[in-house]
Amino acid sequence: MTKLDQQKLKKILSTGYRKASEPIDIDKVFEIAEKLNELEEQNKRAELFEYEHGH
Amino acid sequence: MNLRSRINGQNYLNMNMVINENLTEQLKLKTALFDTNVLSTIKKYTKNLDVRYFLSTLNKQKCSVCVNDLIRLEFLRDANKHGELTERKKYLAALCAEVSLSISQQTYSDAMLLSYIHVRHKNKGIEFVDLMTSALLKNYSHNQGLVLVTANHKDFPLSVHDRIGSIVLDLGKDLATLGFYRINMEKWNKEVIDLLKDETWNSDK
């Protein structure tokens, strides 16, 4: 694996957690969660549509 | 009982969750290890006041939230598309602190030992991730610093764990009972001694 590949892999696996001393930004957590829930719902609907009309 | 509290400048009306002072005190300056089911509950119920109050209480007690690598993997693998994976990672990054809970050879050995203890107690079907999580709790039990928070009580039996408290989140249609668990080293050592004494287990046959 090249150095560039290793860097790419590292980026894919990166976590980026906040520092332990920082409190949870609850509004930010909920904002991200709501966006995620919406995205999951959209994807689910798209998959269902594809299943119903794609065959 | 409805509570009316004020935390971080916000009023919480019509909130049902009660967290007793003893548990609150035990979480002070500690690290809460969230199980996958807790991550999913918080993700799902973003408008719920009990969930908000629970997280605010952890902030107030300066209790960090973390996950281990296996729980992280369990949460991330539920993503179906790249976009979902990215958002799940962002969610974890916002909720959890960077606390390193490395899985060592000792963790594997303890997980193996624990699986034998569970078999002796006829506790069947305990998930691999939960065995490893218990073993990690044991490795971090020396200063009582790590507390597991989970809605899965079956996989953390009291034969080796202590439940230091519980809370009920009123989620509308559902209720979630979260337990706070630690490994009790006295119980653990007793179970290991019993295992060694048991001829069925220490026989070469």
Image (spheres, helix red, strand yellow):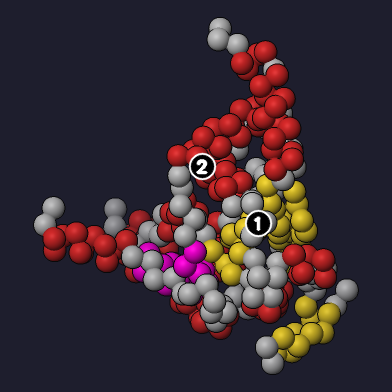
Marking on residue B87: none
The image quarter containing residue B149 is: bottom right
- Identify the amino acid type marked 1: Asn
- Identify the amino acid type marked 2: Thr
- Dot 2: within a 10 Å radius of its alpha carbon, few (fewer than 14), some, or many (20 or more) residues? many
Q: Tell me residue A48's x, y (percent).
A: 40, 60
Q: Is residue B173 left or right of residue B45?
A: right
Residue occupying the point 61% across, 64% down = B31
| Vertical arrangement, residue B173 with respect to residue B68, above or below | below
Q: Which residue is mark 1?
A: B143
Which corner quadrant holds the C terminus of chain B? top right
Element under disc 2: helix
Residue occupying the point 68% across, 79% down = B60
Q: Is residue B91 magenta?
A: yes
| Vertical arrangement, residue B73 with respect to residue B191, above or below | below
Q: Which one is nearer the viewer's eye here, B189 or B121?
A: B189
- Dot 1: within a 10 Å radius of its alpha carbon, few (fewer than 14), some, or many (20 or more) residues? few
Q: Is residue B138 left or right of residue B26?
A: left
Residue most toward the front?
Answer: B142
Part of the protein shown in magenta: B84-99
Q: Tell me residue B195's x, y (percent).
A: 67, 24
Q: Is residue A49 visible?
A: no
Chain ID for label 1?
Answer: B
Residue occupying the point 61% across, 34% down = B114
Q: Which one is nearer the viewer's eye here, B160 or A50?
A: B160
Q: Which residue is mark 2?
A: B107
Q: Tell me residue B204's x, y (percent).
A: 55, 10
Q: Is residue B50 left or right of residue B116?
A: right
